[in-house]
Image: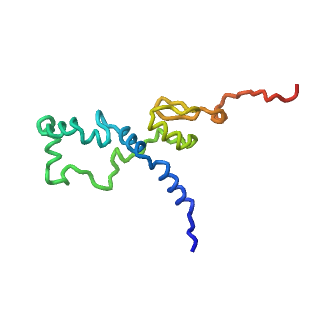
């Protein structure tokens, strides 16, 4: 019996192989930040985080009360009402970073470098800066291909 691998299965397998890298996963969690905290294991289990949690009863009593209350239904909106965090950021709709090879993205995340042929935009995203990308620009570019003389 032959096993048939569909397009979706192949994509999923390729995606898994692309991110199956311990340093990449660690770096991704380090880059997820809120205020002075990130989601890395080292940060969330570190001395500073433990100290902050230990002192929260005195430093933020209102939050402590909310955190330790037993009736969790208090002050919660209905489940089917959209919340501000549920709204997708519409500013990135036209951004397509698929023109940068996955291996370059992985290497960039791990080493904090910008791959050759790329640059970083004002939002901190990588952009391809190859000649092929200039075809999308409205400015016409003339190239002498060495035809008739």
Q: Is residue 94 left or right of residue 86?
A: right
Q: In this view, does 27 lie to the left or right of 77?
A: right
Q: Residue at x 57, y 35 (%)?
A: 128
Q: Is the residue 108 above or below the residue 86 in the image?
A: above
> Colour scheme in the image?
rainbow
| Farthest-out residue, right | 149
Q: Is the residue 11 above or below the residue 62 in the image?
A: below
Q: Residue at x 17, y 36 (%)?
A: 51
User: Which quarter of the figure has residue 57?
Assistant: top left
Percent of width and height locating residue 24: 42, 43
Q: In this view, does 40 lie to the left or right of 6?
A: left
Q: Which residue is drawn at 24% across and 42% down?
A: 45
Percent of width and height locating residue 29: 36, 42
User: Which quarter of the figure has residue 39?
Assistant: top left
| Farthest-out residue, front | 22
Depth order, front residue of 125/30: 30
Q: Residue at x 26, y 41 (%)?
A: 44
Q: Is residue 97 left or right of residue 29?
A: right
Q: Is the residue 143 above or below the residue 49 in the image?
A: above
Percent of width and height locating residue 52: 19, 36
| Farthest-out residue, left | 58
How many numbered discs?
0
- Indicate the quadrant containing the N terminus: top left, top right, bottom left or bottom right: bottom right
- Indicate the quadrant containing the C terminus: top left, top right, bottom left or bottom right: top right
Percent of width and height locating residue 125: 48, 35
| Farthest-out residue, top | 149
């Amino acid at each position: 019996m032959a096993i048939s691998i569909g397009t979706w299965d192949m994509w999923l397998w390729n995606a898994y192989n692309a991110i199956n890298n311990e340093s990449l996963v660690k770096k991704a969690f380090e880059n997820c930040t809120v205020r002075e905290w990130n989601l890395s294991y080292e940060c969330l289990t570190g001395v500073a985080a433990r100290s902050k949690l230990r002192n929260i009863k005195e430093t933020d009593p209102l939050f402590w009360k909310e955190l330790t209350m037993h009736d969790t239904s208090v002050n919660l909106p209905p489940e089917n009402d959209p919340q501000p965090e549920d709204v997708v950021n519409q500013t990135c709709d036209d951004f397509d970073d698929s023109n940068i090879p996955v291996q370059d993205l992985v290497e960039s995340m791990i080493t904090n470098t910008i791959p050759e042929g790329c640059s970083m935009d004002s939002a901190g995203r990588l952009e391809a800066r190859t000649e092929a990308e200039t075809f999308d620009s409205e400015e016409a570019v003339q190239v002498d291909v060495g035809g008739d003389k």
